[in-house]
Image: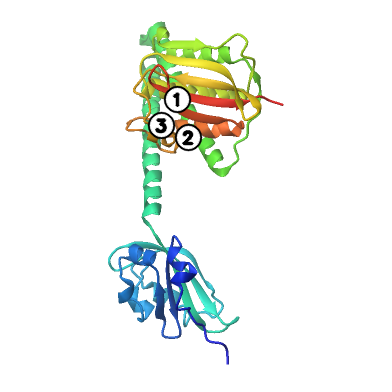
Amino acid sequence: MPQSFRVPDDLASNGLEFIPDGLVAAVGPEATVRFMNTEAERITSIAAADVLGRDIREALPLQDLDGHSWWSVADPWDGQSTRTGHRERLLVLPSGRELLVTAKYVRGGPGDSVRAVVMGLRDAEGRRRAEAESAALLTTVAHELRSPLTGVKGFSSTLLRNWDRLSDDQKRLMLETIEADADRVTRLITELLDVSRINAGRLTVHAQPLDLRPRLEAQVERRVAAGFERDRFVVDVPEDLGPLWADPDRLEQIVANLVENAVRHGGGTVRLAGRRSAIGERPAVDLIVADAGPGIAPEHRELVFSRFWQGGAKHGTGLGLYLVRGLVEAHGGVIRAEADPGGGALMRATFPDGD
């Protein structure tokens, strides 16, 4: 006779009460529920007292998203004898509560009947929030792309239809606007691709020694060309700073995003600076971008580097500082949000020196 499967009476003392997921165990051919932890009660909103001793198929009448009984589809006890369980699936209770469910079918040996079904339960709310964030990102990206593309379409159509009636200055203005909008689209697509590479761990950089001052001054010139007052920006780089080791293209992305963040969310003068620093015992250079705005609350100084963080702003994708952190860390560096001594927010990106 094969040894019968027994669920210990002291499951809670064995630690199953303290795991972060819900757990339900049903045994025997009658599928009798023998254990349900507190987390499973919370996730299902069903009391263990109403489940224990009952047929799990009746106590937890799970359905798929098409309304079909999951127990009829899966049929652990009378289904294929080779099944050992199933991976995570989104199932629904009659109450409408959505659960992420995994199952393990316990057999005495290959081909034996199922002695027990152990189910892991997770709240589907986290996944729903992630899906909502992805949907919000798609909406935002669509808006960010549509705005410059609308300008490109409008000005290019005007040029084609009225070329002979437009002055050279008008043509130049329209072409410059088209170029600026095309650059904006290119930057957004580049950022999205880089975010994908960061998430996949495939972002690569090729660091080399760079003179920081001209690169910061070039960013200021771009802002002035975009219509900002020159005296709003200050570049502060000591003559003896030495090189900053970074990938030239990636450094331009980092500085551009930090300045954009300072201009959009900060206020007053924006200071772009470089200072000697260290990461542990390794020499490094700090790239600093500070503004004179309201600053960042201490409890938000890590959150600002999260994906989709916008801090109440109604523009942008919320990916700028997330991308900056990924790019800085790809160089072996670190970035921190601090309070500027003169007021406002200060972003300090530290790049280690090359070997």
Quarter of the picture containing the N terminus is bottom right
**Mark 2 or mark 1: whose residue is earlier in sequence:** 1
Q: CA distance from mark 2 to mark 3?
A: 19 Å
Front-most of residues 173 and 168: 173
Report the residue marked by disc 2. Answer: 322
Question: What is the three-letter code of the residue carrying label 1?
Answer: Arg
Front-most of residues 189 and 92: 92
For the residues labelled 2 and 3, say whether their Cβ atoms are less than 8 Å apart: no
SS category of the residue bearing label 3? helix
SS category of the residue bearing label 1? helix
Quarter of the picture containing the C terminus is top right
Q: CA distance from mark 2 to mark 1?
A: 18 Å
Crowd band around label 2 with a 10 angstrom C-alpha radius: few (<14), some (14–19), many (20+): some
Q: Residue lying farthest left?
A: 95
**Mark 3 or mark 1: whose residue is earlier in sequence:** 3
Q: Which mark is residue 184?
A: 1
Asked if residue 76 is positioned above or below residue 271 in the image, the reply reads below
Question: What is the three-letter code of the residue carrying label 3?
Answer: Leu
**Mark 2 or mark 3: whose residue is earlier in sequence:** 3
Query: Which corner quadrant of the image does residue 277 belong to?
Result: top right
The x, y position of residue 348, in whole percent, is 50, 24
SS category of the residue bearing label 2? helix
Question: What is the three-letter code of the residue carrying label 2?
Answer: Tyr
Q: Is residue 190 visible?
A: no
Left/right placement of residue 326 relative to residue 139 reads right
Report the residue marked by disc 3. Answer: 145
Query: Which corner quadrant of the image does residue 197 belong to?
Result: top right
Q: CA distance from mark 3 to mark 1?
A: 8 Å
Crowd band around label 1 with a 10 angstrom C-alpha radius: few (<14), some (14–19), many (20+): some
